[in-house]
Image: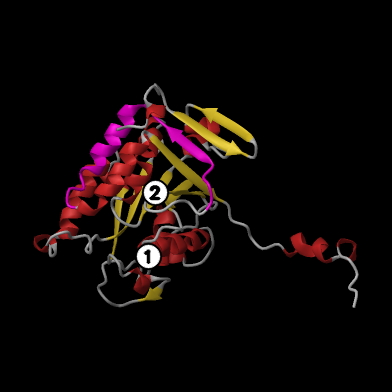
Amino acid sequence: MTNKRHEHINEAEFVRLVGDERRTGNTLASVSRHWQGNKERFLLISPHDDDVVLGAGLFIQLAQKENVPVYILIVTDGSMGYCSKEQKDKISEIRQKETYQCYKSLNIPEENIIWLGFPDCRLNYYRGRRFSDSNDFTRIEGYIGLQNSFTYWLRKISPTQCFLPTSSDLHPDHQIVHEEFLISLFHAAGNIWPELGDKIEKVPYVHEIAVYCDFPQPPKVRIQTPQSFLERKLDAIAAFKSQKQINSLVEVVRKSGPCEYLRELNFKLYQPALYYDMFEKKHHMPFIR
C-alpha cells in the first residue's frame, strides 16, 4: 500500500533544506545551488546493476524530463548474484540483459549504460591503480584498478554532478566504490595520468543516494513525484527477475511512495589557518597547579 501522504501529488516537487530555510520548486534547476543549464550532465555510479534504480529511479526520470543527459556506470559484473545453481555459470549475461531492459525503460540510451566489469565481491583486489600486461577485461591504457577506470570515464563523460550509494551501506562493494570514486574525482581534475584523457575542468558536485542502509547524516534534498513515476520505477526494478534477494528492498520502495532523498557531499580541504585562533591565549584559562 502506498503511503497516503503522496496520493494526491500531481507534479514533481523538489525540497532543499539550506540551514533553517526550506526551498521548493518543480524542477531540479529551481532548487539546485550550482545549476549549469544545458551544460548539466549526470553520472550515476552503481556498484551493482540494480543499485541506482532502487535509490534513484524517480530522480532519473525527472532528470530525463529536464533533458539532462544521464549516464549509468555499473562497476561489477554481477557474477555473485546467482540465486539458483542453474544460474551460476550464466548470471552475468542474464543480469546484463536485465540491466539494459531496466534502464532503457527509463529512456537511458544503451550507449550511456557503461559496464566496467570488475569481479563481483572481489573489489579489494582492484583498489588503486597498477600496471598490468594481462588480458584483464578491466585494463585501460595498460593499467587496471578502480581508480584507473573511474578516472578514465570521468574524463570521457565530464559530468557536472555525480550520484552514488552512501558510504554507510553494509555491502563491501558499495564501501569500496564510494572510497575509490571520491579520490578518482581529484585524479580526473588533475594532470596525473594524461593517457586517460584530458583533465576535467572542475570536480563535479557529488550526492549520495540510499540503497541498503540509511545515510550517515540526514539528507538535505527530497524528491516527490506523481504515483505514475513510482509505478514506472517499480516496473524498471522488476526487470531484474533473477535477483530474488531484492524483493524486500522493492517492498520498502513501494511502501515509501513516490519519494527519494539525496545527501550532498562537501569536500573540506585542509586549511591550517582555520585553527590558528583556537590556540591563542585569549581563548584559554591559565593552567593552575
At 37% from the left edge and 45% from the top edge, which residue is drawn?
Answer: 55
At 28% from the left edge and 53% from the top edge, which residue is drawn?
Answer: 49
The N terminus lies in quadrant: top left
Measuring from the top left, give residue 134's x and y in whole percent: 27, 76
Measuring from the top left, give residue 227's x and y in whole percent: 33, 28
Which of the marked residues, 1 or 2, is nearer the chain's N terminus?
2
At 33% from the left edge and 77% from the top edge, which residue is drawn?
Answer: 132
Residue 105 at least partly seen: no
Residue occupied by mark 1: 172
Q: Are marks 1 and 2 in contact (CB under 8 Å)?
A: no
Residue 73 at least partly seen: yes
The residues colored magenta run 217-242
Task: Give the SS element for disc 2.
Answer: strand
Measuring from the top left, give residue 262's x and y in whole percent: 47, 44
Horizontal side of 243 relative to 114 (left or right) equals left
Q: Quadrant of residue 140?
A: bottom left
Up the image or down, 252 lies above or below 155; here it is: above
Q: Residues within 10 Å of mark 2 (few under 14, many from 20)?
A: many
Residue nearest the viewer, comparing 14 with 39: 14
Residue occupied by mark 2: 44
At 41% from the left edge and 50% from the top edge, which residue is drawn?
Answer: 157
The C terminus lies in quadrant: bottom right
Residue type, label 2: Leu
Up the image or down, 27 lies above or below 103; here it is: above
Residue type, label 1: Pro
Up the image or down, 31 lies above or below 53; here it is: above
Q: Quadrant of residue 7?
A: top left
Task: Give the SS element for disc 1.
Answer: helix
Measuring from the top left, give residue 42's x and y in whole percent: 42, 44
Number of numbered labels in the structure image: 2
